[in-house]
Amino acid sequence: MTLLRGDWFYAVLVALDAFFMTRPYLYAIQQDNYRVREIFKSRRLSFVYLFDICAVAIFTGIWLAFYFLGTRAFWGFVTVLFFFIAEFAMYFMEDLPDRKKPLKYTKRAVRCLLFTTIFVSAVTLVAFAAATSSLSEQYLRYLVLFAFPVVYPLMFIASANIINVFERLNNIRYMRRARKTLAARKDIIKIAVTGSYGKTSVKNFLHAMLATKFNVLSTPASYNTPMGICKSVAMLDATHDVFIAEFGARRVGDISKLMRLVRPKFTLLTGINCQHLETFRTENNIAREKCKILDVGADGLCVISNKVKNRAEEALLGMKNAPEALFAGIDGGDVRAENVTMGEMGTSFTLAIGEKRYQAYTSLIGMHNVENILLAAAMAYSLGVEVPNILAAIEDLAPVPHRLQLIRTESIVIIDDSFNSNPDGAACALDALKMFDRRKVVLTPGLVELGGKQSEENYKLGKKMAEVCDLALLVGAKRSDPIRRGLVDGGFGGEIHIYDSLALAERDFSNRLKTGDALLILNDLPDIYDEKR
């Protein structure tokens, strides 16, 4: 195998192209926690690959036409040069910052980017050298360069799988360090929060209540994966009394892994529904996995949403050393809300703890925010926080961004519930919209990751919307069709407008929205679901 003199130029072109091509593929797997096998779940990436195939076909056709010219060596070089220029332009444009969530250049992402660039470049150049030494007609070796983008996905998958072995070993090292740090702090109160919905809100509310008595560290934002929790543990110091960890789960085994990492003594279960049914496969798998957070031993304490009382009690009965359990909810439990009154400016209710009653007020809207407050209040009360401090914290609570966040502008009111919506959350968001005495508009791409129930749940969403809103703005014609049918079957009398992407819907706001409207933004899907791509 050999390369001809001057072939360094092709080596540079291949390396540059590999670098630019890797970024959208890296972005796609970063959105799915670096799981390579579902790479083409990204519609955007599928579109880019098809465009690549078209470019290869066009330039290969031009290259074949030049084969019959006496000056084909020169024209072959020119064709390859312009082919790579077209590749650079396409992938440079693909990386423009128009995404909802841009590629994050974390240490792991940078390692994957550099390794893949080197790996893909090496494989391509080895193939190019082999063709150079084995083909009598050197003009034919350019076929390797044209084939490079066609087989690139396979090379990326191979490269990512190779480096993922290292990343898994590296993650084990971080997890061991985090476990050791937490185990050394015998005095610290360790609390875990999980559920199909409401995790981040409950975590934030609990942090605010506990902070009136303790020095609290909680996982920031939605840091609910093993590595996110490990990063949070690294911030733990001797002054902290409490560590609150949010546990996320998309697959069977995720909660078990996090329980082994943190080993909490106190846990909260916010609720269970069919969120992530696509990856869990069955609803029973979801329920079993979420209930694993209850296994904290006889000296532990679990605060559980009253909505899942039956399922939780079944799980507790199956444990050898079942912990104490407290149930909280609007519909009953040890900690309850009574006389709930909601309006545009906030919510007031009576906080019932056992036989005692306290008047509470929050600027937050939505019945599920009340339920989240009850779960946090039950845990805070159990850990010795005085009721006046709990009530003061409730009054000062700020909405979690993109989770029923109320935004008032000069012309309209926006209810931003765009973060990872689920059937229960969507219903609560629509109930909150119902309170507004003005024209009601819903912008939504629908619900995803619900497996075989996705169409059914989106149809139900459409029927619920028909009862509440006056104008429906739907994103994605194919995905939102069940919502449209639900609206029609629900007797919806308003207008329905369907857009290929969220960006197109936003551009049409000036034509659809009126002064005084209440706009509910219900779910904002990642770019991988964008149908225009």
Image (cartoon, rainbow, N blue to C red):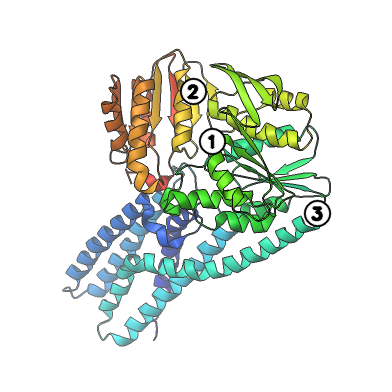
Whether residue 35 is visible to the viewer of this picture, yes or no, is yes
Q: Is residue 104 among what the camera can see?
A: no
Foreground mark, 2 or 1, reads 1
Q: Disc 3 or 1, which lies upstream in sequence? A: 3
Which residue corresponds to mark 1? 307
Find disc 3 in the rendering and name its residue: 185
Residue nearest the observer in this picture, 282 or 446:
282
Q: Name the image quarter holding residue 515.
A: top left
**Percent from the top left, x then y, of residue 287?**
51, 48
Residue type pointed to by label 2: Ala
Amino acid marked by disc 3: Arg
Q: Along the line of sight, which residue is nearer the eye, 471 or 528? A: 471
Q: Is residue 511 left or right of residue 178?
A: left
| Tag of residue 432 | 2
In-front residue for pair 242/477: 242
Q: Position of residue 172 (x, y in %)?
A: 64, 65
